[in-house]
Each structure stands twice: as structure tokens, then as C-alpha cells.
Image (spheres, rainbow, N blue to C red):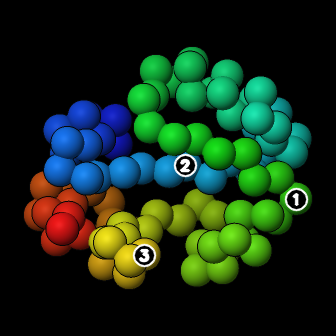
Amino acid sequence: MLESHYQKYKDQGFKIITLMETDANQQPSSATSAARWRSEMNLNYIVVSVSGGTGLTLFPAFAGYPSFKMMSVGMVVTAEDVFPVTDNTIMAALP
């Protein structure tokens, strides 16, 4: 679902970054496991390994995995845990 939104809006500046703390076996993720998962899921957006709680250190607003944040330019959160993601939600975050 997110991939289709990414393809639709990427030329307007829409970015998706998935923070992957554990792999499919619930083990700490690695760059290799993140890349493998991205490939298996046929994703074109960024997937980053953040094992050991690094994601919470880098992005404390993301505490409580799984969580979804929509941010505008300047990392301003415009929506939280929105499901399903709609065109209107995305348009509100775009420049």
C-alpha cells in the first residue's frame, strides 16, 4: 500500500523511511536483513536497520513500534498512526 503511494507522490517530494529494529525472526536487524526484506517486499523506498533501540534514540517521537508518522518538510509531524493512508493525508504533508 505504501509503495503505491510512494510511486504516485515521489516526484512531489514524498519520502518513506522504514525503521527496521528486528528482522523476520525477531532478531536485531542488520543492513543485510533490511536490504533482504526490502527486496523481498519489492519496495523502492528506504529501509534502515536500527537495531538495539537506535531508532528510538534517533527518532524519540517514534516510541511504541509499530507506529506511523507523516511528516512535512522540517520533520513536522502532520499525522500519526493514520490507517488507511489517504491522498489527502499525503497532500497535507507535501510542500
Q: Which amino acid does label 1 sit on?
A: Gly
- Mark 2 is surrounded, within 10 Å at the Cα level, by few (under 14), some (14 to 19) or many (20 or more) other residues, namely some
Q: Nearer the viewer, mark 1 or mark 3?
A: 3
Q: Mark 3 points at which residue?
A: 75
Of 92 and 11, the residue lying toward us: 11
Mark 1 vs mark 3, CA separation in Å:
23 Å
**Label 3 or label 2, whichever comes before in sequence order:** 2
Q: Is residue 58 left or right of residue 28?
A: left
Say which element carries label 1: helix
Q: Mark 2 points at which residue?
A: 18
Tag 1–tag 3 contact (CB < 8 Å): no
Q: Which residue is drawn at 18% across and 68% down?
A: 95
Q: Residue at x 69, y 71 (%)?
A: 58
**Label 1 or label 2, whichever comes before in sequence order:** 2
Q: In this view, does 45 lie to the left or right of 79?
A: right
Q: Which amino acid does label 3 sit on?
A: Met
Q: Mark 1 points at which residue?
A: 52
